Amino acid sequence: MRRCNLGLCAVVLMLSLTCLSAQAAPQRSDAYRYIGSPSAPQYPLPVDAARLNNTDKISQLSSMQTAGLIRNGFVVIPDDAIQMFYLYENYPDAGESPTPNFITVDSLLHAYHLFFDFSLRQVETKYLVPACLELSKLCAFHNDKFSNKLPDGPLKEAARANVIYFSIAWSLIVGQEMTQFLQPAELVIYEDEMKRIGTMAGRSKSPLMGNTIHYDQFRPRGHYTRSEDLKRYFRAMMWYGTIAMELSARKPPEMVRKHQLQALLITKILAGDDKARTLWAKIYEPTEFFVGGSDDIGYRQYVPLARQIFGDSLQLADLGDKSNLDDFMAAARRILPEPKIAPFFMDADSEGNLQPETLGVQGRQFRFMGQRFIPDSYMLQNLVSPKVLPLPSNPRDARDMPLGLDVMSVLGSARAYGHLLNIYDQGRYPQYKEQMAKLREEFFSYPEEKWWSNLYWGWLYSLHADRRLAR
């Protein structure tokens, strides 16, 4: 129990220090950066095992393990430790002298990971799960109320589509069917979507939205497998982060118009209802601090433009005006940014059959709770097709999948880049070296404040700062 309490205190202290240091970024270099020079004694390899200290601790090594110790200066052996930090808590028995612990850099990085994962998990369980439930119900209620006020037509259809959209998220976070705002005819679409989510049925056309959804993304992973609450939260947030409302002119016009009416109704709710806006921010802003801001367009980007075209109060009658909608979409395409991380993929039909003629890069989309900009995802996207070209002599040999060494190479590891070129022959792909050079130049140009803008970037910066050790 004592360890648990200290762990929680450490998490709170870490988050507090991170917040304070992020606010005082100009002082970080003096306050936090080690400015000395490593001066550990050097030793030649192979080592002389007979001259090692604490030889009684290695007496049970096998001949193969002893040979590895002599050759490399260390050896990794099996252990029954459940957690990594147990390896560093080898306390002596009564009457014994303590054995020095071998502390490695990876243990510090692992500690950062544990702090990050544990604190995020606590925040999600205690605060974000209930906020997501309440927000989903509230938005379903608002759209149902809108539809009752509207005459038959595209805007009413968009409101009813939003009722289904939020009822699905509400059901996912609760863990049971929440259909009180649905009309009988809408249950077919609702049940079809819920079945595809529940079976994680691969890539197919969404019955509700008409565009392609990767339903296999609804499989909980990482710490989201630890409890039923977190599994439900994961699926609900995956729904909000995956389901896109198309803005791109490359998509079918009727789909785009319907999606944009849905997005504008959502914008109206969050702009006009203080409770809904507070709940949305209660989810978005803590996760922004942990991971970063959305890479997709959301209500905060839509509000100023929508008010400029439809009026400050975003009246339903104005939202339903066709010419206003045309003006809004044209302005949004002109002003609002494309996503920096945009997958290159094919659409699929309702049966999951891929449609090669649709192959392309994702365009602008509105999302209720957008996918976050993750720097390593951005690196990897820029080191695969279509940015990196197939082998000219064999077009089937394309770099469609990245390697883990790509990230370390962008962050400055000469050894990682050497392995990529000399062992894995990645330089055979046209534009690979050029893309790597561009990414290195971009990430090395960022000021230190950028790296400490959120916890995820700071975690990655610990690898970036150590790049010199791998040269």
Image (cartoon, rainbow, N blue to C red):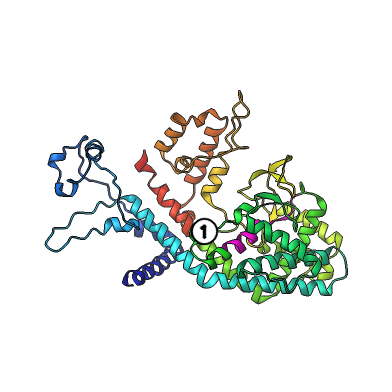
Query: Which residue was labeled with disc 1?
Result: 291
Amino acid type of the residue tagged 1 in the rendering: Val
Identified at 54% across, 43% down, the residue is: 380
Where does the magenta region start and end?
Answer: 233-248
Q: Is mark 1 on a helix, strand or loop?
A: loop
User: Could you tell me residue 96's position as x and y percent?
Assistant: 13, 59
User: Could you tell me residue 224's position as x and y percent?
Assistant: 51, 61
Q: How crowded is mark 1: few (under 14 residues within 10 Å), some or many (20 or more)?
A: many
Identify the main secondary structure in magenta.
Answer: helix
Horizontally, residue 67 falls left or right of residue 310, namely left
Relative to residue 388, is residue 98 depicted above or below?
below
Relative to residue 201, is residue 15 depicted above or below?
below
Horizontally, residue 102 falls left or right of residue 164, namely left
Q: Which residue is nearer to you in this view: 191 or 403?
A: 191
Q: Which residue is nearer to you in this view: 365 or 46?
A: 46
User: Could you tell me residue 430's position as x and y percent?
Assistant: 57, 29
Instruction: Say if the magenta span includes residue 460.
Output: no
